[in-house]
Image (tube, rainbow, N blue to C red):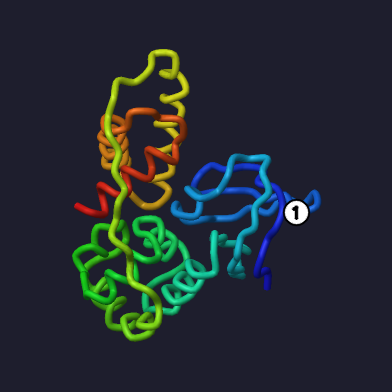
Amino acid sequence: MIGRLKGELAEKQPPHIMVDVNGVGYDVEASMNTCFKLPDPGCSVTLYTHFVVREDAQLLYGFYDKYERTLFRALIKASGVGPKLALSILSGMTAQELVACMQREDAAALTRIPGVGKKTAERLIVELKDKLKTLPAAEPADFQLTGNDLPGAALAAIDGYRQEAESALVSLGYKPALAAKAVAQAEKQLGDINSSESLIRLALKSMVSG
């Protein structure tokens, strides 16, 4: 079992990252919320991990803190939820928001995440609500961005950020057309686009919040 990685962040292409540990590169799948918190490639990072062994693959999932990993492990124990869907859920909501969603039995919010239907959402609430009672509820959201005109000199870079953001959303299960629309709307709201993460963060927030 690989429980933690500490090394240099070699690559970051959400939701895929690579951590170089003493010359060995570990491919890791991470939630968007973890990717948002990670520094730029070349910096030192520590990730808490969950290792999955299948007949056809060995997969490593990484998390910024133990709290998110605990929720991931709780999710994959629920009926009908595998690692990919669990990662998608933890990308559409922060760990604290997910706990709060479970506590108030908000199935509608869960169904806005790709791959989570009404029955799956209701089953998650039934199976996890009591197990998550000891975890803190989400704090009030204060995320807010304002829009300004985009600087012309950054258009080429922004186009790259846009493509990376759309690709990341598609990898989470969103349809290409919906991903492109959400990224375009996020782009209109942002004043200073300096990373694909900023587009992904706002696009996810708009889609999950409805």
Which residue carries the number 1 mark? 21
Horizontal arrangement in the rendering, residue 197 relative to residue 62 (left or right): left
Figure quadrant of the N terminus: bottom right
Q: Position of residue 162 (x, y in %)?
A: 40, 31
Q: Name the one closer to the observer, 49 or 120.
A: 49
Q: Residue at x 65, y 70 (%)?
A: 3
Q: Position of residue 41 (x, y in %)?
A: 63, 40
Horizontal arrangement in the rendering, residue 76 relative to residue 11 (left or right): left
Q: Residue at x 40, y 52 (%)?
A: 172
In this rendering, the answer to whether 30 lies above or below 191 is: below
The quarter of the picture where residue 177 lies is top left
Q: Name the one closer to the observer, 126 or 96.
A: 96
The quarter of the picture where residue 102 lies is bottom left
Q: Position of residue 196 (x, y in %)?
A: 44, 36
Horizontal arrangement in the rendering, residue 141 relative to residue 169 (left or right): left
In this rendering, the answer to whether 106 lies above or below 146 is: below
Q: Classify mark 1: residues with Cα within 10 Å, few (<14), some (14-19) or many (20+).
A: some
Secondary structure under badge 1? strand
Q: Residue at x 32, y 43 (%)?
A: 202
